[in-house]
């Protein structure tokens, strides 16, 4: 089950990670949400612990397939 975690970030509102499917849902403050596939759990934890979640995610997001969520 995915648990929504709110972040203290100027770019990212919240994230939800599914360990089984290795999907990461990212809700951006501007209102868009995306589901990223094949995200290792360590990347999810690094995102949660990053000094700047937005900067961290911008540095790694292009490694993953994604789709825009409605």
Image (tube, grey):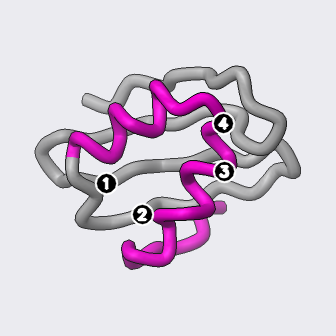
Q: Main secondary structure of the magenta part?
A: helix
Location of mark 2 (residue) = 36
How far apart, in angstroms, are the residues tagged by discs 3 and 4?
A: 5 Å
How far apart, in angstroms, are the residues tagged by discs 4 and 2?
A: 19 Å
Which of the two residues, 29 or 8, is positioned nearer the viewer here? 8
Location of mark 4 (residue) = 52
Circle 1 residues within 10 Å: few <14, some 14–19, many ≥20: many
- Disc 1 or 4, which lies upstream in sequence? 1
How far apart, in angstroms, are the residues tagged by discs 2 and 3?
A: 17 Å
Location of mark 1 (residue) = 23
Q: Nearer the viewer, mark 4 or mark 2?
A: 4
Residue extent of the magenta highlight: 41-70
How far apart, in angstroms, are the residues tagged by discs 1 and 2?
A: 6 Å
Q: Are dots 1 and 2 in contact, CB under 8 Å? A: yes
Where is residue 53, by image quadrant? top right
Q: Residue at x 82, y 50 (%)?
A: 31
Q: Are dots 3 and 4 in contact, CB under 8 Å? A: yes
Q: Is residue 12 left or right of residue 10?
A: left
Circle 2 residues within 10 Å: few <14, some 14–19, many ≥20: many
How far apart, in angstroms, are the residues tagged by discs 1 and 4?
A: 21 Å
Residue 45's place in the image compared with 19, above or below, is above
- Label 4: which secondary element: loop
- Disc 4 or 2, which lies upstream in sequence? 2
Horizontal and vertical percent position of residue 34: 57, 61
Horizontal and vertical percent position of residue 43: 32, 46
């Amino acid at each position: 089950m995915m648990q929504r975690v709110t972040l203290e970030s100027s770019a990212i509102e919240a994230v939800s990670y599914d360990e089984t499917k290795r999907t990461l849902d990212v809700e951006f403050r501007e209102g868009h949400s995306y589901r990223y596939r094949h995200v290792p759990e360590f990347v999810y934890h690094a995102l949660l612990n990053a000094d700047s979640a937005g900067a961290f995610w911008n540095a790694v997001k292009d490694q993953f397939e994604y789709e825009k969520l409605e």
